[in-house]
Image (cartoon, grey):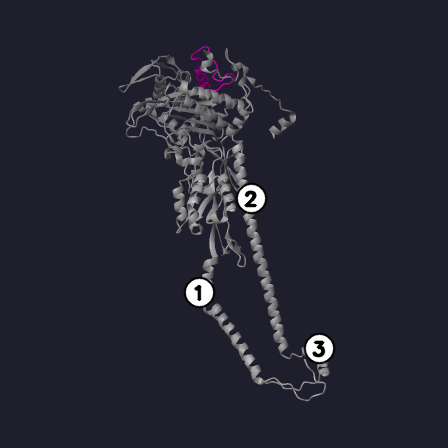
Amino acid sequence: MATRTTQSNRPVTISRWRINAAFLLAMLVIGRIVLQLGNLQVVQHDYLSSKASREIDRRVTIQPRRGVIRDSKGNVLALDVDRESLYVNAGLIDQKSAPKLALVLAGLLGLPANEIQARLQDQEHYSRIARWLEPEIAERITSLKQQEPETWAGLDLVPEPRRVYPQGSFAAHTIGAVNFEGVGISGVEGFYDTELKGITGTITAQWDAGNNPIWITPPRTRPASDGADLQLTLDPLVQHVIETELKAAVDKHQADGGTIIVLDVKTGAIRGMASYPTFNPNRYNDYKPEEYNLNPAIARLYEPGSTFKIVTVSAGLQSHSFTTETQVDDTGAIDRYGWPLHNWDSGAHGMITPGEVLYYSSNVGALQFNEITGPEKFYQMVKAFGYGKATGVDMAGEGEGIVKYPDAPDWGPLDLDTNAFGQSIGVTPLQQVRMVAAVGNDGKLMRPYIVQQRCHADNCATTQPQQVGQPISAEVARTIRQMLIKSANHYASGGPPDDLWLVPGYAVCAKTGTSQIPDGHGGYRDATIGSVVGLAPAENPRYAILVKIDNPKDDIWGVVTALPVYRSIAAQLLRYERIAPDPGMVGPNQVAGVIQKPEDSQ
Amino acid sequence: MAVNIRQLFPLEQARARRIELARYLRLDGGRYLIAAALLLSLMSLVSLGQTGRLATKGYQLAQLQSQQIALLRERSTLLLQLSEAESLVTIEKRAQALHMRPMAPEQARYITIAPTPQTADKVTR
């Protein structure tokens, strides 16, 4: 800036109009800003805030985790695992490369290429191509997305929970299955579905483009409550043994199927429950509904045959209608109300006691003792043992059985006679094994149960054994057990007096039965069910066991089809319980704990 | 608006006036306005800072939750592998592959251990 060296008294002035103009311009700009702010923040407040809210405010559901199911040793039987499902947003797919993409995916997924291509070209929907991919396939697709991001844009891998049964068909009927909508449809999964699936939660928040909640306005969360974890009473070794034995027996005798149940005598806990044919709950939809929806052990009725004679003898002894020394004349065959009734071999045994009714499995003897007992006391005992109603086991689909009581309009006195040897009455396998468990438990009838413990986080509720009745006294129970030991050993030898031991080294109880299968029209099919019920060991029993083989093709008799299975299972369970054999309970040519197979003795 | 037109003094006097600091503080009523504006700005800065920190914490929380979900998924996968390995069918196959055979019943030996006084006492209690 130039400066004058000489002093000057002329004043420096600023024009008023320049200042006014600058001021006016500033006011115009500020005014415009204020007006626009007012328009946005006041006039359009409601509209703009609702528009923003629609974009960023969302309520998202929090899915709970379905509870884990374990066996009594803690091994996992069912759990939820996240598996990735492949979705496509066709709008982001380069349609020129869609056919090539479809071919690659068809090879990976095993699906038709044309179906995949149709999804890739459907720009109106965000659709799923494949659900629950195996981890290897999901990894392969992830790797391809990383290698060619432009080609694979629009394909998303979304994790979705899937119910997985890591042990396949192990205890399948007992555990049940969950359908593709996550609903339990059978077994424990069905019965405990509400507890297993938990409670859905929600989170209401403002979300950014990356689906992260924006915490400027804190989210409102209602947390999800995960489902309860269940621990079953199933013993994995017991279950494995009975499944192996059952499959072998059904295959050997070309039977239609079968059931084995092992019950804890003292508590009613189900240690093993197997039915064959079985199914894989991981692929339940590959099977017919009656195969995965129905547990034969608790739902399928059958006539128990001679195993029901235990009830017949119990009724008479408990009601003091006869004693252990009372005798009736077993003539091998007898006429009642115009119907011929006979023993299984039509053989006569002369004067026999109740114990010998079980020993010889005499139908004629049983019906005569039942006539002594009378219908009132007999059916009182039938009711006391829980027949004709559900046991209350905690599994879906239990049957009640069919019992014709004297007050039924179609009951006749012939029913008393046929019921004596287990015909004209329908029971479930679980009812039958529970009956013999009561005999082993000094007459106490227990409610069977399959879930040992239910845990929500750290809060666990343990099922307590529940006694639901006392059909017979401890003394009668002990007496019947002694009879059943003799009955069991009778099968090992084929006749007195040189009875061997059914399981050498151990006293076990057993009673076989062979019954015809009703045809649904009042008659019977040309097919039978062979069964056996028993206790191992006989004194202070640990296990009540039922084996049932349906319609074996090579031999109709339970003593041939079901009894060897029972022997083998009893021997293995007694070893598992570390019960030492008694050298005094070993017959000639027998080795303690060794079951001699029929072919070994030839 | 009134405008004062004054004669500007010569340069030396202008310099002297410039370094007279007290002059700058003679704002009269304007000082209160400036103070209010400063206070408001400070509060806005603090609020902005808090909001920013809150949003950052929120994102960190979301990241931790994602990590938790990923770990839970991994746990489920490991649990699945463990249960498959623990199945008796698998163990049986592996045992047979290692040339093991099931124990024969006649190979079992039973030893009865008599209870000691201490164990007998515990049982009694």
Asked if residue A447 can be seen in this view, the reply is no
- Give the secondary structure at mark 1: helix
- Give the secondary structure at mark 2: helix
Residue A34's disc is none
Decide if residue A445 is on the left or right side of residue B56.
Answer: left
Do residues under tags 2 and 1 come within 8 Å of each other at their CB atoms? no
Q: Residues within 10 Å of mark 3 (few under 14, many from 20)?
A: few
Magenta region:
A479-508
Quarter of the image with the C terminus of chain A is top left
Distance in Å between CA atoms under marks 2 and 3:
65 Å
Whether A29 is among the magenta residues is: no
Of the two numbered discs 2 and 3 on the same chain, state the one appearing first in sequence.
3
Asked if residue A346 can be seen in this view, the reply is yes
From this view, report whether residue A186 is shown above or below residue B64.
above
| In the foreground, A135 or A541 | A135
Q: Percent from the top left, x then y, of residue A29?
A: 52, 75
Write down the chain letter for disc 3: B
Kindly identify the amino acid type of the residue bearing the numbered disc 1.
Tyr
Residue B71's disc is 2
Do residues under tags 2 and 3 come within 8 Å of each other at their CB atoms? no
Q: Percent from the top left, x then y, of residue B8?
A: 67, 85
Kindly identify the amino acid type of the residue bearing the numbered disc 2.
Leu
- Give the secondary structure at mark 3: helix
Q: Do circles 2 and 1 both sit on a common chain?
A: no
Q: Which residue is mark 3?
A: B21
Q: Percent from the top left, x then y, of residue A538?
A: 49, 21
Q: Which residue is mark 1?
A: A47
At horizontal 60% and vertical 68% (from top left) the residue drawn is B41
